[in-house]
Image (cartoon, coloured by chain):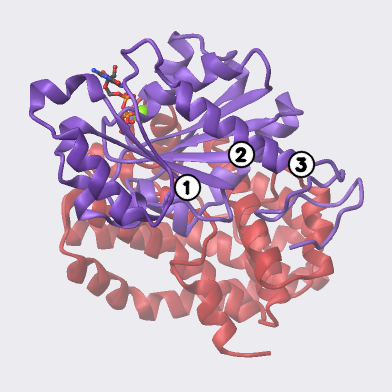
Amino acid sequence: MTRAALLVLADGRFPAGGHAHSGGAEAAVKAGRITGAADLEAFCRGRLHTAGLVAAALAAAAAAGADPAGLDVAADARTPSPALRTTSRRLGRQLMRAARATWPDGELDAVARRFPKGAHQPVVLGLAARAAGLGPTDAAYCAVYESVGGPATAVVRLLSLDPFEATAVLARLAPELDRVADRAVTSATAVRTEGVDVLPAASAPLLEIGAEVHAAWPVRLFAS
Amino acid sequence: MHLDHSPHGPAALSADARRPDGSRRALRVGLGGPVGSGKTATVAALCRALRDRLSLAVVTNDIYTREDAEFLLREAVLPPERITAVETGACPHTAIRDDISANLEAVEDLEDEVGPLDLILVESGGDNLTATFSKGLVDAQIFVIDVAGGDDIPRKGGPGVTTADLLVVNKTDLAPYVGSDLARMAADAKAQRAGLPVVFQSLRSESGVADVAGWVRARLAAWTA
Ligand SMILES: Nc1nc2c(ncn2[C@@H]2O[C@H](COP(=O)(O)OP(=O)(O)OP(=O)(O)O)[C@@H](O)[C@H]2O)c(=O)[nH]1
Ligand SMILES: [Mg+2]
């Protein structure tokens, strides 16, 4: 186990397809809900405590060795929007490719074979962390960071927001990332005895609705 | 990378020459170059020139719209199931070079769904002179510039102009109107490219895409040899 592997997996440049997705930020910008750094912070906070928490718990559980197929069903149940389910599987497939090339691993191969069109991204993220020799806490950190880092980068492109301001938003959220990762790991740890129903099911209706609207646009910069 | 080539193995990783079932995959050729230089027009012409003999598919990387894919569909250069559009998140060069996941998925899905294929053309969204394709995505790349973008582009160089397997200087029919010096462009390109081939073409002329089509056929012959 190497701590630096966490940096490799969490790096925004890890080639797993995330750059083409805004995490709902494009829809929020278009609707006038994000116009600058303050709104971006509010948006990221909301995403962190809902989609971010759920993703982190799924990732931590997968990293801890819970059955990936069971977690995949749990992810489906926690993602009401069909567009978001499609996106999550697509990103899961892309992450799977990058992870298999980076950390060759029999468990990853088995899940790739079982889900040729992709398992949900947080589940694959947890498995990737596991293949990299990382633990549930690391996987949860990757997921919470991704849940806010993706929209922040996208908003820099969408609004020409000052990149320093966007990065400062992420820094201000850092203590909250710690707390959400903690909660995620606690519930993931309980999966072994209580099953996947113990995982959080926080949802953000506006993110779900925004994703559906966005998926129907004929013209857009980001895939989601 | 050759991790698993059993018939039921998981999908290939990137540039593997063989598909999971052991068969040889299609040759992948990337087309990049500045906005409006004639990439889609060249793709369309290549499809018309090659589709009778070869099994083809196209992946487009539109930056903002689906215009390239829609143009190809409207022109009916291939049946719709052979054309896929990839969305690139405001960064066309990232999708063909730094993070090729979505494009790899598109070429593999095309091969699974309409295959077997001989050739897949991947068109990049119009970009700048530094945009090149990753070797993990394509086997060969064509860089398309035009005479109207300024006849000093070959001299300026950049990775696309200097390293592409084929440099196409398009729209030669417009040279007299925009005052571009074709001889100078040819000399500059030659100096920049250390012996790599250059084609001057006008898709408005009789010969059209013939030279590029010939080059693609030669690459394909080498690929399947
Ligand atoms: N005169 C002339 N026009 C051409 C030629 N080739 C393409 N065009 C025209 O140039 C315009 C742009 O061509 P496209 O093929 O769409 O260019 P592109 O490189 O795909 O553009 P983007 O995808 O937007 O970067 C179209 O109006 C074409 O009809 C040519 O050889 N001569
Ligand atoms: Mg085009």
Q: Which residue, given by chain and number where applicable, does mark 2 sit on?
A: B219
Q: Where is residue B98 in the image (x, y as percent from the top left)?
A: 45, 59
Nearest to the observer: residue A134 or residue B97: B97
Q: Where is residue B216 in the image (x, y as percent from the top left)?
A: 56, 33
Name the kind of residue labelled 2 in the image.
Arg
* Chain containing the residue with disc 2: B
Residue A61 drawn at (x, y percent): 70, 69
Give the CA separation, mark 2 to mark 3.
10 Å
Q: Which of marks 2 and 3 is nearer the N terminus?
A: 2
Q: Are marks 2 and 3 on the same chain?
A: yes
Label 2–label 1 contact, CB within 8 A: yes
- Image quadrant, ligand 1: top left
Viewer-proximal residue among B137 and B89:
B137
Structural distance between the alpha carbons of marks 2 and 1: 10 Å
Tag of residue B225: 3
Which amino acid is tagged 3? Ala
**Residue B85 against residue B177 in the figure, above or below:** below
Labels 2 and 1 in the same subunit: yes
Mark 3 or 1, nearer chain start? 1
Query: What is the spatial separation of the Cα atoms under label 3 and label 1, in whole angstroms?
Result: 19 Å
Q: Residue B165 carries which label?
A: 1
Amino acid type at circle 1 is Asp
Q: Which chain carries label 1?
A: B
Q: From the image, which quarter does the C terminus of chain B lie in?
A: top right
Chain for disc number 3:
B
Please rate how many residues cluster around mark 1, counting C-alpha atoms within 10 Å: few if below 14, some from 14 to 19, many from 20: many
SS at mark 1 in the image? loop
The answer to whether A220 appears left or right of B83 in the picture is left
Q: Which of A103 and A40 is in front in this view?
A: A103
- Name the side, left or right, on which B145 lies relative to A35: right
> Which shade is chain A?
red
